[in-house]
Amino acid sequence: MKADIVIIGGGVTGTAVARKLTEYELDIILVEKEADLASGTSKANSGIVHAGYNADPETMKGQLNIQANPLFDKLCSDLNVPFQRTGSLVVGFNQQDLETIKQKKENGDKIGIPGLEIIGRRRLQKIEPHINDRARWALYAPSAGIVSPHELTIALGENAAQNGLQVMLENKVEDIETEKGALKAVVTNRERIECDVVINAAGVYADSIARMAGDEMVIRPRKGEYFIFDREYGDLINHVLFPTPTETSKGILVTATAHGNLLVGPNAYPAGKEDLATTSGGLVEIMKGAVKLIPDLPRGGVISSFAGLRAAAPSEDFIISPSPSVWGFIHAAGIQSPGLTAAPATAERVEQLVKGYYPSERLVKKDDFQETLPEKPHLYDYDEGDLEDWNEYIDRREDYGEVVCRCEHVTRGEIIDALHSPVPAQTLDAIKRRARAGMGRCQGGFCGPRVVEIIAEELGISPREVTKKGPGSEILQEKTKDLRLKKKTADKENRDNQRQEGKYKDPAQDAAKNAEQDAEQATEQAAEQDTEPKTEKQLQQVKIESGGADGE
Amino acid sequence: MVSEFKDKYQLVIIGAGPAGLGAALAAEERGVKDILLLERDYFLGGILPQCIHNGFGLDYFGEELTGPEYAHRFIDRIPESTVQVMDETMVLDITPDKEITALNRHQGVQKIEAKAVLLAMGCRERTREAIKIPGDRTAGVLTAGTAQRYINIEGYLPGRKVIVLGSGDIGLIMARRMTLEGAEVDSVLEIMPYSSGLVRNKVQCLDDFDIPLKLNHTLTRIEGDKRVERVVVSRVNDDLEPVPGSEQTVECDTVLLAVGLIPENELTKQMGIELDPVTGGAVVNEQRETEINGVFACGNVLQVHDLVDYVTEESEIAARAVSEYLSRRRKKRRKKIKLTAGEQITYVVPHRIDYVYQDKDKKTLKLFLRSSVPVEEAELKVVDGRGQELISSRKKIVTPGEMETIILPLQFLDEDTEELTVSVTKASQGAD
Ligand SMILES: Cc1cc2nc3c(=O)[nH]c(=O)nc-3n(C[C@H](O)[C@H](O)[C@H](O)COP(=O)(O)OP(=O)(O)OC[C@H]3O[C@@H](n4cnc5c(N)ncnc54)[C@H](O)[C@@H]3O)c2cc1C
Ligand SMILES: Cc1cc2nc3c(=O)[nH]c(=O)nc-3n(C[C@H](O)[C@H](O)[C@H](O)COP(=O)(O)OP(=O)(O)OC[C@H]3O[C@@H](n4cnc5c(N)ncnc54)[C@H](O)[C@@H]3O)c2cc1C
């Protein structure tokens, strides 16, 4: 395969870069090791578009944050991504907190963050009625906002795909080929792609990718855990609420998500690159932190918990730079917080670096670049007042009239849209991220079976091939009765073998009576002996006997 | 069903499980005309069609039926009734003045006006998150009811080596079902010192298949990359906290959660109706009527029942009430009676008694309740506001897992009664 540019990583960084670069007449491929975009940190974070008062303009992350924040209104409206400028509050309880808040305001004013204000207790309680009544001050930043991070990532990728990006999922980069200090090809577990330029946006694995090209880099993941609450509690608060950070801790924040759920977290501690497990200690820590801001947090209202990994470089800053050793290789690494906010600006920075590798006449902008993603209807965006407007869609396709996910009110039509979107959803998780089916309070208990059925039908595969998040995470293991059949056939074969070896005595009459017990025992024995090849054969046999195990 | 619903009905019932079906038929029998039954699934019967085991109907029909058979006792009567049924129709919203917004493929979003509304939406299962099991977020963690649907309705097995959390009836039954399908069930874990399921289910589902029941144990972690690979099981102390050092690792590919049911009251909440924090269902009077006049509730949406037979019984109470409401035959008591859950009782349904009964066929009132702890040689008692005992009854044992009833003769309630308290205590020796 050949391309001009290969982007490694389908997180918000990779997809934002992809969208930017598809403005040009270039052949671009994005490779992602997982079964969907937004499978790394970009799906598991606070979803906050930071105002930037924290930013140190000396750092790359600070600069990009300040630059990117104002871009969100247009970006999210073009891509139909839920985004609200709710504003944020840094809440202070004592004199020391007030000092910190004042410093932040001073810093923010200096770098031009609009509208910063320190507000007192009365106003605070008026705009946040559920806030701890011991809270005395807050720094109000009207330009902070909340965005749905996975939807932003997917929308960026899908808009890029609409403009010619080729997305290759389940492609894990395993090697970077170079020749005399110049880039040659990117090799994945499935493909070898020759290209001129590579962008390393591999999140916590950016260091492994860097090493493939001979660059030194260290990324040390720092985990953060979260709780999500039922949508019912979304209006408990009106702004993003941060505690005042101290020397030792940044503290736990409380925010609404762009879909109106309540989100609390994160903590921070070093973790492995695959370690997304939530811990009981961590979850206790988060709850404890969160009730400091909102004491009447409904503890029973939690519907999900999750963890994300900050891809921290030792400098604690982003590394957006050309490789010192390989011509054509660009790093977009160390993208920890505020990487989500920064993404549109990160993309522009990378665009500048790409320009360095091409003569300007090669970089021609497309005249048919589509800036907007066609709108996909979502029933959950409608409430009592305007529900009848939904009929417009049902008139077009009856599938919009069949509710599949009852908690989030997702229709069959929306699920089918997700399966046929520019970067098609292939898994339950991918559908959940595009259409929200299974994201609600029952977490897919009811709609899981229906969604599996729809995926299988639409993609023309067996329900057994449907996965939660790619190969190895199949939802269903067997057709019913097959496991039993397999055990029985394995057991019979085992007896036949024993008989051949003269070890088995046929308990003629008892056999019928005790068939079941026998079966169980023999299977256990069979399992102890090495019966692998036999089982394989038996499997085929069962398939033939039952007319193909997958049936119709 | 290709019929269309109209925009006005006497009675609209939400949910065609046994509660909704039973109430629709019973209401018709009592003379209610013009009934619409709305169901979001493509089959009727609610959760019953997936409960292919037997054990249903002993109480109500006096014979042992499977879930689908029980459901069909009602479904089969629908065609010759005047009840109009719309399946694959989801109710999205109800206003306090009983305007219903429903959605289906053929009619789209439509509004329906109702004189009376009966809520019969059933319940959903508690998830991993509701009980906060830490660990990896892999495939292979599902609720027992979802597994039951995959196996019994869709025909697929969701796992090969299974651990079950929760020893209520659903957990017990699914442990057996998975075993019968050839899966290996390592054990059933129960955080409490007793199983909350029926005794017969424990014997027939676990003992008969040598599946260990580990009381005072819970899951403290789920591990795996794409799919569950192992879980950590811990013993718990008297405060139900895991005991450090008691962790054991169990290899398995599937975790079935049978950790309780939650009444599905989103619509009820949208209407602004008060819920009982203990039952998770609406606060109702003896007519199963919520705070809003003419809005009733019955079945699992009101309180989680152990046996579907009780659901049917409750649906008949509600149906009768609906007919009385529609024909304006009810007479309010001068003073409402408030029912309170007293000693060792978690809840009592109904929450209030609002009406006076004079007709001859209504002489008693049945109170439904649960105890908070198992009590042997128990005495159930109803005491009024002045401390006077109205009625008491003895039981060999009451447990939180089994719903109890007390039959209260209406003649015991005088005009001035304002309060009743129900309690369960160990019967004092010798007394009768
Ligand atoms: C707890 C937490 C809270 C945060 N909160 C905020 C916030 O509120 N606001 C904000 O602005 N930022 C926040 N961030 C930061 C933000 O989430 C990240 O900076 C951003 O998501 C990083 O995006 P990315 O695309 O660089 O990385 P990722 O999203 O991790 O994407 C990298 C992708 O590369 C893929 N990949 C890795 N190796 C390979 C390979 N060998 N081959 C192919 N593909 C590969 C991965 O599968 C992954 O999909 C937070 C981060 C954390 C952890
Ligand atoms: C997994 C499981 C196993 C069980 N096993 C047993 C057993 O072995 N023995 C026994 O006696 N009992 C058993 N039960 C209990 C018994 O089945 C229930 O008590 C009974 O089904 C409750 O009846 P219901 O009508 O209240 O609710 P359901 O049967 O749940 O019916 C409610 C109906 O309402 C519909 N609905 C909900 N919301 C809407 C809406 N907005 N619009 C339209 N329709 C809606 C639902 O789709 C559903 O069909 C079991 C229950 C469960 C959940």
Image (tube, coloured by chain):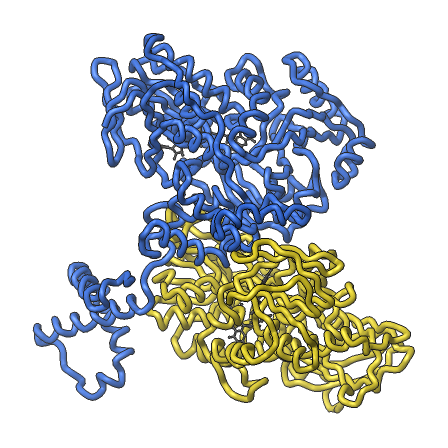
Residue B13 drawn above or below residue A214: below
Q: Quadrant of residue B86?
A: bottom right
Residue plotted at (51% across, 72% down): B48
- Residue at 39% from the left image edge and 24% from the top image edge: A218
Residue B242 in picture, x, y percent from top left: 54, 57
Chain represented in blue: A
Image spot of residue B75 (x, y percent)? 53, 76
Quarter of the image with the C terminus of chain A in it: bottom left
Residue at 72%, 44% in the rendered image: A295
Q: In which quadrant will I find the N terminus of chain A? A: top left
Q: Is residue A329 visible?
A: yes
Figure disc tally: 0
| x and y, in percent, of residue B316 in the image | 67, 79
* Residue at image location 60% in from the left, 53% down from the top: B109
Q: Nearer the viewer, residue A175 or B389?
A: A175
Q: Position of residue A65 (x, y in %)?
A: 55, 20
**The chain in yellow:** B
Residue A290 falls in which quadrant of the image? top right
Rendering quadrant holding ligand 1: top left
Residue A281 can be seen in this image:
no
B133 relative to B225 in the view: left or right: right
- Residue B138 placement, left or right of B133: left
Which is more toward the observer, B161 or B140?
Answer: B140
Image quadrant where residue B198 sits: bottom right
Q: Look at the picture and state if B383 lies above or below A210.
A: below
- Left or right, residue B414 beside residue A477: right
